Image (spheres, helix red, strand yellow):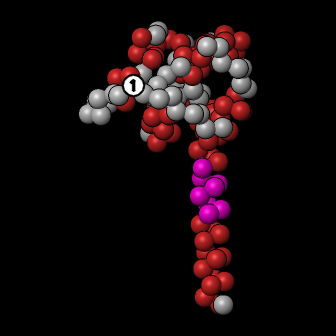
């Protein structure tokens, strides 16, 4: 099935839906089910001095592979938690992952600030 085209910002902003996994062995690491294990690694990592047009094309091809992967969410979270500085992981480029991480940090700060404000209001009430 063809996936609708997405811009990079849309991919970074919207969490992907998890594709149901066919009863994977729970003791096996998530990456044993990764679709990219069967693809060329060069698709997911940039060669040195890659022209911009070639990089964008390669990244889109890698994202298409990720879109059909049953462990895309696990892969993405791995890359965000490590954090992986290079390559396409879980359908996100390194730049897109930096945006996601910045948004998470901003959200966490806002939640902490809101919790402090709520706590002060409750104490004063």
Q: What range of the chain is rendered magenta?
A: 104-111
Quarter the C terminus occupies: bottom right
Quarter the N terminus occupies: top right
In this view of the protein, can residue 41 be seen by the observer?
yes
Q: Image point 50% across, 11% down: which residue?
A: 42
* Residue 125 falls left or right of residue 37: right
Q: Tell me if residue 106 is in the magenta stretch.
A: yes
Query: In this figure, which residue is indicated by the disc labeled 1?
Result: 22
Pick whichever, 67 or 39, lies toward us: 67
Dominant secondary structure (helix, strand or loop) of the stretch shown in magenta? helix
In this view of the protein, can residue 31 be seen by the observer?
no
Residue, far left: 27
Q: Tell me if residue 22 is in the magenta stretch.
A: no
Disc 1 on helix, strand or loop?
loop
- 104 lies above or below 53: below
Q: Image point 32% across, 30% down: which residue?
A: 29
Q: Image point 70% across, 20% down: which residue?
A: 4
Badge 1 density bin: few <14, some 14–19, many ≥20, Cα 10 Å: few
Residue, far bottom: 125
Tell me where residue 118 appears, x and y as whole percent.
64, 77
Q: Image point 40% across, 15% down: which residue?
A: 37
Tell me where residue 115 appears, x and y as whole percent.
60, 71
Tell me where residue 98 appears, x and y as whole percent.
60, 39
- 21 lies above or below 83: above
């Amino acid at each position: 099935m063809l996936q609708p085209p997405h811009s990079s910002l849309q991919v970074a902003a919207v969490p992907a839906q998890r594709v149901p996994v066919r009863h994977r062995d729970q003791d096996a690491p998530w990456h044993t089910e990764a679709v990219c294990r069967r693809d060329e690694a060069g698709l997911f990592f940039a060669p040195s001095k890659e022209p911009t047009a070639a990089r964008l094309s390669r990244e889109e091809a890698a994202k298409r592979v990720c879109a059909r992967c049953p462990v895309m969410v696990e892969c993405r979270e791995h890359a965000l938690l490590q954090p992986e500085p290079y390559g396409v992981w879980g359908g996100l480029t390194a730049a897109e992952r930096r945006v996601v991480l910045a948004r998470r940090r901003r959200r966490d700060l806002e939640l902490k600030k809101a919790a402090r404000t709520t706590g002060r209001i409750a104490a004063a009430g």
